[in-house]
Image (cartoon, grey):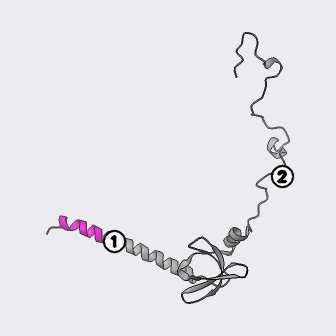
């Protein structure tokens, strides 16, 4: 056998090696993430449920899914361990980011006037022509 006939098999074996290597890295990262869990940490399950860790066993985790409601899950069912700020933002709607300017203005005047108080240019469509703008007898009345 020469090298040309062996080349496809070598490429196939190399591709399989690279795929298993990346899968092992992902499994190690997931295990490391699950090891970061401590009681009181916010988590998201692989089913998309957000909960707080209450107890950690060898293969199981007790989660508080609602106040006073506890459920036992396998450790492998934990999809992500969340930071406190992210968990509070998602679950409780608490946003730690403070801005000086509101996202939505309190009144419409800030939208219709420049910073110096002069009115902004109105580019809106006018409903009806006024005064001299009306079409004459010889002009077409189409808009």
Does 2 appear in magenta? Answer: yes
96 versus 114 height, above or below: below
The quarter holding residue 74 reads: bottom right
The quarter holding residue 67 reads: bottom right
Q: Please give the residue where the numbered disc 1 appears in the rendered image.
A: 16
Residue 78 point in image, percent of width and height: 57, 77
Is 100 on the left-hand or right-hand side of 3? right
The C terminus sits in image quarter: top right
> Total label count?
2
70 versus 90 height, above or below: below
Is 70 on the left-hand or right-hand side of 6? right
Q: Of helix, strand and loop, which mostly describes the magenta segment?
A: helix
**Closer to the camera, 42 or 21?**
42
Residues drawn in magenta: 1-13
Residue 70 point in image, percent of width and height: 67, 83
What residue is shown at x 42% (from left), y 73% (from top)? 22
Residue 116 point in image, percent of width and height: 84, 43
Earlier in the chain: of badge 2 and badge 1, it is 1
Residue 63 point in image, percent of width and height: 64, 81
The N terminus sits in image quarter: bottom left
Q: Please give the residue where the numbered disc 2 appears in the rendered image.
A: 106
What residue is shown at x 68% (from left), y 68% (from top)? 90
For the residue carrying disc 1, how many other residues have a C-alpha within 10 Å: few (<14), some (14-19), or many (20+)?
few
**Mark 2 element type:** loop
27 versus 127 height, above or below: below
**Closer to the camera, 51 or 123?**
51
Q: Residue furthest top?
A: 138
Q: Residue furthest bottom?
A: 58
Does 48 appear in magenta? Answer: no
């Amino acid at each position: 056998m020469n090298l040309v006939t062996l080349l496809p098999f070598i490429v196939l074996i190399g591709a399989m090696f690279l795929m298993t290597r990346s899968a092992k890295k992902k499994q190690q990262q997931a295990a490391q993430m699950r090891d970061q869990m401590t009681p009181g940490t916010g988590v998201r399950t692989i089913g998309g449920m957000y909960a707080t860790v209450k107890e950690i066993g060898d293969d199981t985790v007790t989660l508080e899914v609602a106040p006073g409601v506890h459920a036992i899950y396998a450790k492998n069912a934990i999809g992500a361990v969340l930071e406190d700020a992210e968990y509070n933002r998602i679950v409780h709607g608490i946003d730690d980011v403070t801005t000086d300017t509101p996202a939505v203005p309190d009144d419409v005047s800030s939208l219709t006037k420049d910073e110096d108080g002069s009115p902004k240019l109105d580019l809106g469509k006018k409903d009806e022509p006024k005064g001299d703008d009306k079409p004459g007898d010889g002009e077409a009345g189409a808009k």
